[in-house]
Amino acid sequence: MEAVFIKAIVSALLVLAVLVSAVPMFVSADNSNASESAYSLLLSGLLSYSEEIDISELGLTAGEMHSVLDSIYKNEPMLYYWGGRYSYSYFSEDEPLEVFPHYNMSAEERAEADEYINSVLDAVIATVPEEISDYEKALYLHDYVCVNYEYDKSYKTVDIYNMIKNGAGICTGYTLLYDELLTRVGIESRAVVSPATELNHMWNQVYIGGYWYHVDTTWDDPLPNRFGEVRHLNFLLDDIAIAVSHAGVYYAEHECLDPTFDLMPWRLYNSQFAFVNGNIYAVEFNEIVSFDLYYSFCNSVCTVASEGWYSSDGFYLGYCIGLGAQGTWIYSNDQTRIIAYNPITKATKTVFGIENAESQIIGSYVLGNMLYYLETPTGYAEQGEIKCIELAPIVELGGDANGDGTLDQYDYIYVKRAYFGTLSLGAAEIKRADVNKDNALNQYDYILVKRAYFGTYVFE
């Protein structure tokens, strides 16, 4: 007698339980049977908006299929139009045949959303300094996410599109947005999940310099939101360090074993970090300081506010001295002014001062050519108004090695010393000093910059 098989269809919803871990900290995500071919086939179908994806030739069990789809949902930010929901058919419960994705928007809506996402993220990536390391790129993008977005207290926003559109999201949105930004600068990232029975949380693992590290942008963004403030307590941690704050079980694809950055003093800095001319700058109490990620040095370079913003033991009283950079200028604020400092020329200037004696500035930051600040008449951030100042665009000037917008004695000395081997320039400085564009800093560049400085040559 011929056997009769009944084809059944069931529905599934990938519920993203958020991550974290402690005792035991790390639990390896079991992807041993989730083959690359299954991931590739299902991802290709989802990216092409397929209504039916045939997986009958893969030989997956239902559990393996769920595992692959779960991994795709957590690690492919640009699948925001899918949302993790699907149905599937089978002849027997352990032999899935087809997957039927449930999409959240039409192909036309997706095309418009893609254009919007790309326009926003391309603009952000364009602001990442070319000469900085992958560690610093990860830090720059970490600060961008924490400063420009806030936690969605309605707990509704979980995808990258609505995160960008609304300026807010939950940990899933933070993780996916950070993942996509890292991908666009060539840094690998994977999601970490702590289930609902534990922390109900999600964050990133990033791969830099041969090691994996934990980065939690959600927990580094203060709640309630504080304009211009970003913390660094959960950036580049190993498994032991992350377990201190993220107590419970979490599921991750990789172990994080490098403790290099776990105890660095810059973790206590609460401003956005600024990158200028090969150095990193932050606000420590009421001063701008220069430092590096390995903390081989930390120098105070400029005082920006009165001590009155902090108690004698350094306790933060409620105002944020923000920080940002454009070109070689670092911008910050005190309670009444926006201040600019050039670490190359040591020049300082007041960019803006509020006229209303009753108002205060609470925080600031820079994105591209725009400087944003929060002004409030009461001292309470929720009663303030976000305002902005458009900064003069950076003009690429031939021979301007230090990038401060002028060709002066600093550039002449830079190029002269670099040519004679007594000064090592960064990649961005070499690019600006290479006036004949032969991809080398040589005698021709030195002669042309020298002539331009002394007024006998004009760059076109």
Image (cartoon, grey):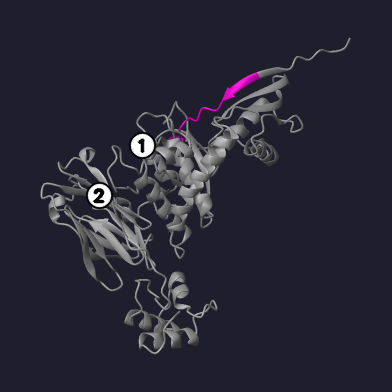
Q: Circle 2 — which element?
A: strand
What secondary structure do most residues of the magenta stretch adopt? Answer: loop
Residue 108 seen anywhere in this rendered image of the structure? yes
* Residue 161 picture location, percent across and down: 48, 39
Kindly identify the residue that appears in the image at 65 percent across and 38 percent down.
48
| Highlighted magenta segment, given as a residue range | 10-24
Q: Quadrant of the C terminus?
A: bottom left
User: Does the segment drawn in magenta span residue 156?
Assistant: no
Q: Circle 1 — which element?
A: strand
Q: Quadrant of the N terminus?
A: top right
Identify residue for label 1.
151
Residue 312 image label: none
* Residue 233 picture location, percent across and down: 35, 47
Residue 363 image label: 2
Position of residue 154 relative to residue 298, above or below, is above
User: Callout 2, which amino acid?
Assistant: Gly
